[in-house]
Image: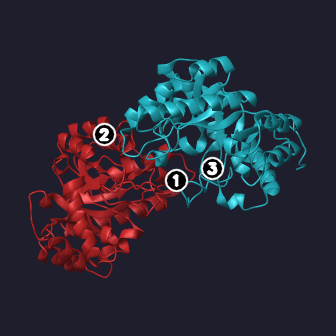
Chain colours: A cyan, B red
Amino acid sequence: MPLHAKSADGERLAVHTMTTKPLSLAEAAEAYASRGIGGISVWVETLAGLTNSAAKQIIDDAGLKVPALVRGGFFCAANEHDRQERVDHNRRLIETAAALEAEMLVLVVGALPGQPLDVQRGWVRDGIEGLLAEAQSSGVKLAIEPLHPMYAADKSCINRITEARQICEAIDDAQVGVAVDVYHVWWDPELSDEIRRLGETNRIFGFHLCDWRVPTRDLLTDRALMGDGCIDIAGIRGEVEAAGFEGWNEVEIFSEEHWASDQGEYLDKIVERYRTATSAAGH
Amino acid sequence: MPLHAKSADGERLAVHTMTTKPLSLAEAAEAYASRGIGGISVWVETLAGLTNSAAKQIIDDAGLKVPALVRGGFFCAANEHDRQERVDHNRRLIETAAALEAEMLVLVVGALPGQPLDVQRGWVRDGIEGLLAEAQSSGVKLAIEPLHPMYAADKSCINRITEARQICEAIDDAQVGVAVDVYHVWWDPELSDEIRRLGETNRIFGFHLCDWRVPTRDLLTDRALMGDGCIDIAGIRGEVEAAGFEGWNEVEIFSEEHWASDQGEYLDKIVERYRTATSAAGH
């Protein structure tokens, strides 16, 4: 398959910079664009040493769009003062997202080990409400990303779409929705129902792709390339699209194995697998 | 604290032989009994090389009771023939459980990577129904143990109490219930409701204790001793008991770290932590 072949499909394909962690923003932008990948979701880590305007220039020069700035959130802290600091930090991230013309800021909401998860979800709601004015004025959407229950202790007190949706409904603002990552939600018996419910109120903001390796050797950095795991990605994508989602398909893979490989060849595989392993048409 | 102090509390304490994996059945039985631990839940692996009657003699000599034989289940296989073999294997495990006078056989239900989880849960229901006659005639209960969603790919297609309860309700037999392991269910936003629902039909058969280490370094063998992690064990135990559970508190910890330690000292700690970190009275 020619690397430079653009397709209608490829134009909905985005890659998270953390997927190709060894690449700088400039290297990633060039490598993505040259393969017909239309979007780059930018991790804050990839911006280190760059001004927002320099980063924006790199992305524009490559002709890429920015689905998301990743990651804000982490609202859970032991006291009011620290929680306010987290909100302030997110306020600055919204500014960065706006400078990059990112559609959304992805919120990984955080968790404080040993604290009741429902209490923590209250902090998350408070934190997001504290950001609404900035989200509205900047046009940057806020996307709550539920993380897999194996991260409930210390990374996210929101572990199903259900709880993310409930917070969205409680806040009831068009700027607040959900990023659905197949890795985190594929196991949920209520997944189909929840995707449908999110769709009814246009709250699917982001859709993230990777796969669940069998066996998974590490809790954090052993995600698989689409097609190399057990997730019915095409099925979930079909449901998300049936629910009205028309946004980017964002490839987000943390993998020591893939980070250690040639990143150009890896991106070729990502493009191929996006075509062959993420939609019913690819089969 | 004297090692040999028996207490009303200690008499409800049981330990899974896999918790002290380096010990033989005879070593484990002696070590548990000498510390006032009243129950031993026997893993099939610990029976290797022993006849059922020899194992029973060892357990009787130590004056221990057997809450559970661990583990049956693994009903999920690609074809009818293989699934029937799994059922037959469970039938033999029920015989072993009866020989040991175990209250229940714990069912880890299995999973087949890439197959729809709801389809697999149908296989599980079929498999358990195929064992009802033996469960009834032997008096051995069948306890479905939901496993954490991080095991959904290849170990268990039942990842919440909800789905275990639904299968119990569909089968509707007093011999079929649930083993609640805090490690697997602590994160579930519906945990309290589900424990209450299980209690209403007397379907809490087993209650397993350990803790969730922060950070967890391995998906399988990095469970923590009660009090060394983030789970509100006392809170969950209180709910289970409020729901009418009067059975054993079974300590089930897989931990390379603890297996590498002195098992006698480790059991002393288990007894101490059972008293101090698993009930509101211990605080």
**CB contact under 8 Å: marks 1 and 2:** no
Instruction: Residue A140: name its quadrant.
Output: top right
The amino acid marked with disc number 3 is Asp
Please report the residue visible at 66 percent of the width from the left and 55 percent of the height from the top: A228
Pointer 2 residue: B169
Task: Identify the residue at the far front of this view.
Answer: A81
In front: label 2 or label 3: 3
Discs 3 and 1 carry the same chain letter: no
Instruction: Residue B27: name its quadrant.
Output: bottom left
Chain designation of label 2: B
Q: Position of residue A2 (x, y in %)?
A: 91, 49
- Residue B153's disc number: 1
- Residue A211's disc number: 3
State whether residue B136 is above or below residue B17: above
The amino acid marked with disc number 1 is Ala
State whether residue B263 is above or below residue B13: below
Question: Across the whole image, how many numbered discs are drawn on residues?
Answer: 3
Q: Position of residue B19 (x, y in %)?
A: 31, 67
